[in-house]
Amino acid sequence: MLAKDFLAVGVFIIVGIVFVAVTLIASYLFRPYNPSGEKLRTYECGEIPLGPAWLQFRVGYYVYALIFLIFDVEAAFIFPWAAALLGFSRTKTLAVLGIIDMVIFVGVLALGLVYAWKKGVLEWK
Amino acid sequence: MNHSAYGIPISWFLTVGALLFCIGLFGMMVRRSAIGMLISIELMLNAANLNLVAFGSYLRQPTIAGQVFAIFVITLAAAEAAIGLAIIINIYRLELHIEADKITSMKL
Amino acid sequence: MAILGFEITGYQIAFVVLAGITLGSAALVVLMPNIMRAALFLGLTLLGVAGLYVLMNAAFLAAVQVMIYVGAVTTMIILAIFLSHRLMQVGFAQAIHNPVFAFAAAGVMFIFLFITVANSLWVRDICAPGPANTDVGVHAVANALLQPYVFPFELASVVLLVALVGAVVIAKEDRPGEP
């Protein structure tokens, strides 16, 4: 796609920003404002919140984010490969080579997933 | 290969890249927390990517290599962020702070 | 379209807006005392860079940028901030160290880079006035990845594997329940 095909995306972004801004400003103009301690408290589905939300979290979450990051990168490589594989089917050797390349790529990364699994970091304790 | 006349010469992109790099450099020097430094490194890597893509696209013989290199740089940046943040978290667990000047637990 | 006698294309307006978003939020990234807000502005900077990629007809790269950088790396950084900052509210002087000297050093660096960009003849010699007008989309990237760059492509998976294993080893919880 060329840059001019993204005009619609630009329009979408501008409309989105304007929509949110207009809604917020309109509600700011029309709402009554008399806060009290109860009203200003963080809304946590009706529960009374314990302590501030900005506190330290368990490190176990990090490993999930890590594995997400690695496989996100993998997806970024798989996507062009998958889109171009049909074009490769013109010549059989190219298609086979392409598939072998990707099997090696995914296989190497699957080793990492197996490692993380064996280490037990994927278990939610 | 024909080129489009957008009215944007390559020097504009290179200038934005240079500015972004210098902002990252500034951040690298002023930040005390290790995560702040890592964020600044991301800015500098993006500046480098911007230059790679600009040259790949603006050369009289345009090449896809600029974009492919940028994808590899992004991959390496992801790996770097994963490892760097893991090290930072571990340092935090040992020392309860991540101020780069004061970290001592890596000394032998 | 002509504004004040200058002929201005829509691409130039888009460039100025995107560059403004990128550089403005990058400045906020390095100046925000609160590291959490800095990380959120980093996401905005990366989105701006993705927009600049689009202007260079590199749409696939822009998608990769949004997917990996904005979607994953920023998330990781925010999570790491959650995991390592007990106190988020710090003063400017506490978070920003020696800004005057750093500004001078970065400014000198920029002046050198700018002189190089503005004066170098080789940039004018080897570059066209606009970006390549060919649809260098997904297929071109895939062909490049699978033919001339197949070895780096496979190496990338090894790098990612090493990063995954290394980060799991480093960040693994020793005792469950303990932060």
Image (cartoon, grey):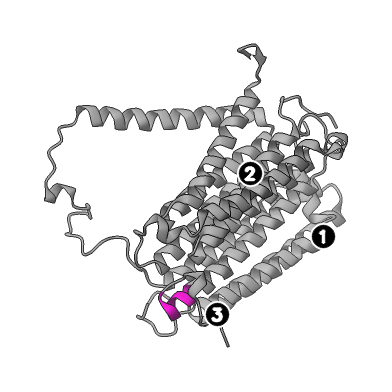
Q: Gap in Å between the C-alphas at discs 2 and 3?
A: 37 Å
The image shows residue B52, relative to residue B76, as above or below, that is above
Q: Quadrant of residue C35?
A: bottom left
For mark 1, name the chain.
A
Q: Position of residue C38 (x, y in %)?
A: 46, 52
For mark 2, name the chain.
B
Q: Position of residue B105 (x, y in %)?
A: 51, 82
Near-viewer residue (A59 or C41): C41
Near-viewer residue (B85 or B17): B17
Q: Gap in Å between the C-alphas at discs 1 and 2?
A: 42 Å
The image shows residue A107, relative to residue C23, as above or below, that is below
Left or right of A59 on screen, residue C65: right
The quarter of the rendered structure image containing the C terminus of chain C is bottom left
* Residue under the point 55% across and 80% down: C169
Q: Which residue is mark 3?
A: C169
Q: Position of residue C32 (x, y in %)?
A: 44, 51
Q: Which residue is mark 2?
A: B19
Where does the magenta region start and end? B89-96
